[in-house]
Amino acid sequence: MPSLKDVRVRIKSVISTQQITSAMKMVSASKLRRAQDAILKLRPYANKMKELLGNLSEGVDISGIDAYSKERKKIEKILIVAVTSNKGLCGAFNSNVIKKTLSLINSKYAEQNKKGNVNLICIGRKGSDYFVKRNYKGVTNYNSLLDAPRFEKVVDIAEEIMKDYRTGKYDKVEIVYNMFKNAAVQYVTEEQFLPLQPIAQANQNKLKSDYILEPSKEIIVKELIPKSLKIQLYKVILDSLASEHGARMTAMHKATDNATEMLKELRLMYNKVRQASITKEILEIVSGANALKG
């Protein structure tokens, strides 16, 4: 049985940890509110742009007028964009993205990986540290982006990826990230960024708007596609940020609850040890008194 001093040290340590996790939970809740507002405001815009692009591209062969829509005959060079976080203590948030990325590298693109044709862009220190330490090829990181996520910075990264695809450096670009649903639920998502996949109409029976188009449908679609790609990448970053804060808030909430339960057990143990110590002292006094009488 541990001594009273050992139990007191453990109680003090758990109380300190509980205070930290509780504070981190409140900080994450505050950050989650802002991140959630940002992604919920962007989604209608992104969805409307996608709907507009779908209406405009109907009946138009996009692959014939836009470089980002052309499927390569042979998929040899792959780029995977893995979006994690710069900090930990957010449950399985980062490990889920890393596992999904590893699955793509070792399963879906195993043949290209053997030839050394799979490159990585890591947005988030946790992902970049993992892959750099294990000597994965072509790991580029943009960790500072998450410190102050602005659309202008995301546009620079999107344009670089689009340029590399357009010039033939990559034949396919995939994005792995956590899609935000609510504070407790985030979905690990794999999306094809390039080439653009055919845009499916959400509701075929929906009445389509009658637009007056100038100069032409083809030119407008060609102009909208690059903007849509930049918005898509920005939406991924905002989704990931909201998911990160939600995952951290949930993890810290569970840690605080666990600390509370542990404190109950430790205080019960402390009382038992203290009671045993007092009982032992009483027995020693009684035994000593009996010895003197004898």
Image: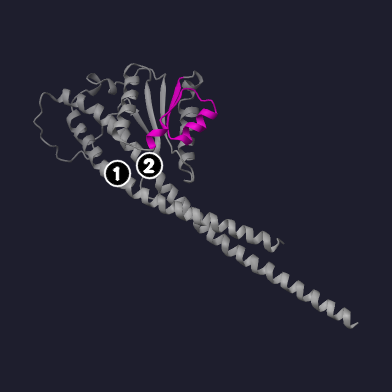
Residue bearing the label numbered 2: 241
Q: Around disc 2, counting alpha carbons within 10 Å, would you say few (fewer than 14), some (14 to 19), or many (20 or more)? A: many
Q: Residues within 10 Å of mark 1 (few under 14, many from 20)?
A: some
Q: Quadrant of the C terminus?
A: bottom right
Residue 261: x and y in percent read 55, 61
Determine whether label 2 and label 1 are within 8 Å by CB.
Answer: yes
Amino acid residing under circle 1? Ala
Residue 149 visible, this orientation: yes
Q: Is residue 193 above or below residue 24?
A: above
- Residue 103 on image: x %, y %: 48, 32
| Residue 277 percent across, percent down from the top left | 72, 69
* Amino acid type for the residue under numbered disc 2: Leu
As drawn, 10 above or below 182? below
Q: Earlier in the sequence, mark 2 or mark 1?
A: 1
Say the numbered circle drawn on residue 38: 1
Residue 184 shows in this picture = no
Magenta residues (range): 117-146
Q: Residue furthest front?
A: 292
Q: Position of residue 287 (x, y in %)?
A: 83, 77
Q: Choose between 231 and 27: the one closer to the eye.
A: 27
Visual colour scheme: one colour
Answer with left or right where residue 167 lies relative to residue 123: left
SS of the residue under disc 2: helix
What residue is drawn where x is 36% and y is 44%? 242
